[in-house]
Image (spheres, rainbow, N blue to C red):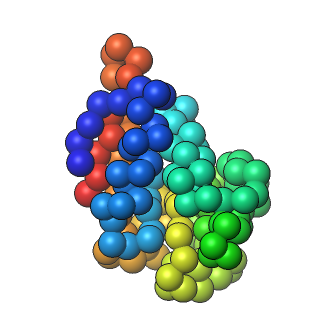
Amino acid sequence: MNKNYSLEDLHDIAKKIISSVENKTLLFYGEMGVGKTTLIKEICNQLNVLDRISSPTFSLVNEYQTSKNEKVFHFDFYRIAHEEEALDMGIEDYLYDNNWCLIEWPENIENLLPLDAVQIHLSTLENGTRNIQLK
């Protein structure tokens, strides 16, 4: 999928992502302020997360519960300096437990990520809309 979108399109974009991916590990790439957390919030809404959704910038991970009693993990690795920090928090247990793992700043733990994880690249266009590419 390669699509330009605005905030009004997020509902449909999130639905399309959820329905089109086979792997529940989603990697969100893009500059600060491009809308990674906003898109993750909408994906969580589509998954019927019951908890308040916020960026785990300082805690590294937030755990959410869905209405179907499933877990969704939201990671933010912006502030880590070394991959060992992710290993210390048990990242491998999260990634290989068949739960949704939504990861911001995955480039900071690149060597630890599953090879079949879905890459979502976000960018801002000159007219203020965003572009999304799934790989």
* Residue at 33 percent of width and 40 percent of height: 132
* Residue at 72 percent of width and 59 percent of height: 50
- When the figure is inspected, residue 122 is found, relative to residue 90, above or below; the finding is above
* Residue at 51 percent of width and 36 percent of height: 35
Q: Is residue 128 visible?
A: yes
Q: Is residue 18 left or right of residue 109?
A: left
Viewer-nearest residue: 46 or 90: 46
The spot of residue 84 in percent (x, y) is 60, 75
The spot of residue 40 in percent (x, y) is 54, 50
Viewer-nearest residue: 11 or 92: 11
- When the figure is inspected, residue 26 is found, relative to residue 131, above or below; the finding is below
* Residue at 59 percent of width and 79 percent of height: 94
The spot of residue 81 in percent (x, y) is 61, 60
Q: Is residue 108 visible?
A: no
Q: Is residue 42 left or right of residue 6?
A: right
- When the figure is inspected, residue 80 is found, relative to residue 1, above or below; the finding is below
Looking at the rendering, in which quadrant would you find the C terminus? bottom left
